[in-house]
Amino acid sequence: MSRLRIGIIGCGSVTQIIHLPTLNQLNDLFEVTALCDVSQNVLAGLGDDWGIATRLPDYQDLLALDTVDAVLIANPDVFHAEVAIAGLRAGKHVLVEKPMCLNLAENDAIIAAEKETGLTVQVGTMRRYAPAFIEACRLVKELDEIRLAKVHDLIGKNSLVIEPTSRVVAADDIPSSMSEAMRERAADQIRVAIGDAPAALQTAYRMMLGLSTHDLSAMREMLGMPQRILYALQRCGGRYQTAAFDYGDFICLFSTGVDNIPRFDTYLQVYGDDRVIRVDYDTPFVRNLPITLRVTDTTDGMNKRNTATHPGWGDAFTEEWRAFHQNVLSGQQAKSSPQDFRNDLVLFRDMIRLMGEASSPAH
């Protein structure tokens, strides 16, 4: 099993632009043996483009294949938990795109299935596998003390980057009834997570699942789990959010939003007494853009020194897949495991609660 045979469940833009090219680049470690998608147009287009003969509309049929060792779950997130558990029970290792699931009940069911089967589940928070981030975590641990931290993620809509740079086979043959059923399923799962929340809080929670899990899981790896959330607020119908996380000796400030400017303003920054450590990310939809580590410090209290390094060529998704291969072969638990992802859901739940309290009439 030194070369893992991968079945891909869900063949949308992230699979087309990122995962298939990455797996092809790493063809000494992986072979894509089957594709699954509800769109026949997508299956035909990708199957032909990549020379993959096995093309299935039903994920259960893919899981029954003895030519698949592990699955990439990249279909709509409302189905992630269902497919991940089925994959484990079918004897397949799982790399699941974030969010792994939408609520704690689903999360705990995946944890139970992983424990029961002894197989690997890795959540696709790929930014945590970037060499610049890993080196930044090492440098942060060397600080005598932390004075302040910031986590910021303000980006333009993905389509602003995807449309001029990539060809995506569109799933334009899916009936509207299927899309409506998916929206209803998502609403039910979010209701389990945060109750009958107003529309703005549902949007905020959706943004946390889709975007903030990158930021806050990286924050947790770099700084640990915060002691408490001092405040969390949303504006613009939930599309812009701020929060402050209390780490006892310091505060971590969080901000996020999505607008119409085609750029990626995303970083983690940690302030010590005489050193500032920062990781800058760019859009993942253009492969191999540098993820940069920047350090500002002084050696004498008089002179300032700025260094910017790119500790390794290669996309964060490439490093994520390398880690998955190693985790499967060694039996080692992924650092972005279902147990780890659970911490994100706890933070999201508590942030939504504070947002709701802040918007209540009493406030």
Image (cartoon, rainbow, N blue to C red):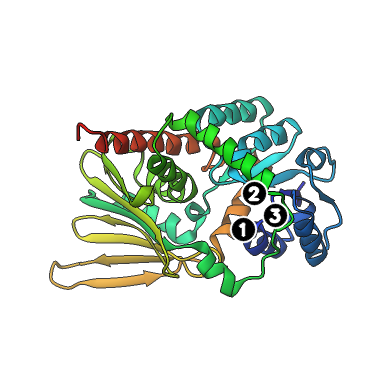
Q: Quadrant of the C terminus?
A: top left
Residue at disc 1, secondary structure: helix
Mark 3 surroundings: few (<14), some (14-19) or many (≥20) residues within 10 A: many
Question: Is residue 112 rendered to the left or right of residue 44?
Answer: left
Give the residue type at disc 2: Ala
Residue topped by disc 3: 11
Q: Position of residue 80 (x, y in %)?
A: 62, 40
The residue positioned 72% from the left and 56% from the top of the image is: 29
The residue positioned 66% from the left and 70% from the top of the image is: 167
The residue positioned 38% from the left and 53% from the top of the image is: 138
Q: Are marks 2 and 3 in contact (CB under 8 Å)?
A: yes
Q: Position of residue 162 (x, y in %)?
A: 57, 68
Residue 232 position by quadrant: top left
Give the residue type at disc 3: Cys
Mark 2 surroundings: few (<14), some (14-19) or many (≥20) residues within 10 A: many
Q: Earlier in the sequence, mark 2 or mark 3?
A: 3
Residue at disc 3, secondary structure: loop
Q: Position of residue 216 (x, y in %)?
A: 40, 46
Give the residue type at disc 1: Val
> Whole-Å distance between the Cαs marked 1 and 3?
8 Å
Residue topped by disc 1: 14
Residue topped by disc 2: 74
